[in-house]
Amino acid sequence: MTAEQRREQLLDTTLELISREGFTGVSIDAVAKAAGITRPIVYGHFHDLPGLLNALLDREHARALEQLAAVLPKASDERPLLEVIADGLRGYLEAVAGAPLTWRLTLVPVEGTPGSLHERLARDRADVRAQLAAALTAGLRREGVDPELVDIDLVVHVAQGVSEHAARLVLTDPDDYPVDRIMALADQAAKVLAATVRTAA
């Protein structure tokens, strides 16, 4: 392996250990054993356990943000609002289903999760809500609805909570809660909400 390939292998191994045993089950010894190498090789790449964990969190955080950026609704999107919302939710759930180990760090907290990860996630969630609020405000205006008639702040908080819970179902019970089943319900709910808003307008 090249140095970069070995580094990625060690990060992948650490991620798999965390998904099975939580952060408390991770040590340099455990990573080396699972990777089939000696401890000095791990130390040569990451110096110590905090260095290894921080590198892993940085990588997985960047991956999750990249996937989110690709699917989050945008204020500049000129399509009908319901279509924008539905595509965003489907894209998010499919990203979660496609990279379950990455998203488990975000959506399914495990024993010993570092406080620094909780802080990152709180900032990320606030950023997501801000983008959703901007997209919703722009979408309502395109639909001829005054955004002042809608409690957008509350809507995006609820939408985020519901979306994350749906993503947890996809992660933990994908056979009973496939993406298509969730999207069928989301489509029904979105139509009811749209009708309610238009009536109020």
Image (cartoon, grey):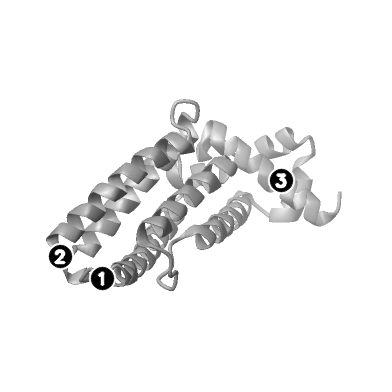
Spatial distance from mark 2 to mark 3, Cα to Cα? 56 Å
Q: Residue at x 19, y 62 (%)?
A: 151
User: Which of label 2 and label 3 is nearer to you?
Assistant: 2
Label 3 packing within 10 angstroms: few (<14), some (14-19), many (20+): many
Spatial distance from mark 3 to mark 1, Cα to Cα? 53 Å
Label 2 packing within 10 angstroms: few (<14), some (14-19), many (20+): few
Residue 15 percent across, percent down from the top left? 61, 42
Q: Secondary structure at mark 2?
A: loop
Q: Residue at x 42, y 61 (%)?
A: 124
Res 109 visible: no
In the image, what residue type sits under mark 1? Gly
Q: Nearer the viewer, residue 61 or 115?
A: 61
Q: Which residue is labeled 1 in the image? A: 144
In the image, what residue type sits under mark 3? Leu
In the image, what residue type sits under mark 2? Ala
Give the answer, above or below, for where 64 lies relative to 136: above
Q: Are marks 2 and 1 in contact (CB under 8 Å)?
A: yes
Q: Secondary structure at mark 1?
A: loop
Spatial distance from mark 2 to mark 1, Cα to Cα? 9 Å
Q: Nearer the viewer, residue 60 or 146?
A: 146
Q: Secondary structure at mark 3?
A: helix
Residue 201 percent across, percent down from the top left? 15, 65
Residue 52 percent across, percent down from the top left? 63, 51
Does residue 164 appear to the left or right of 102 in the view shown?
left
Q: Which residue is labeled 3 in the image? A: 10
Give the answer, above or below, for where 34 lies relative to 106: above
Q: Which residue is labeled 2 in the image? A: 201
Looking at marks 2 and 1 on the same chain, the residue that comes earlier in the sequence is marked by 1
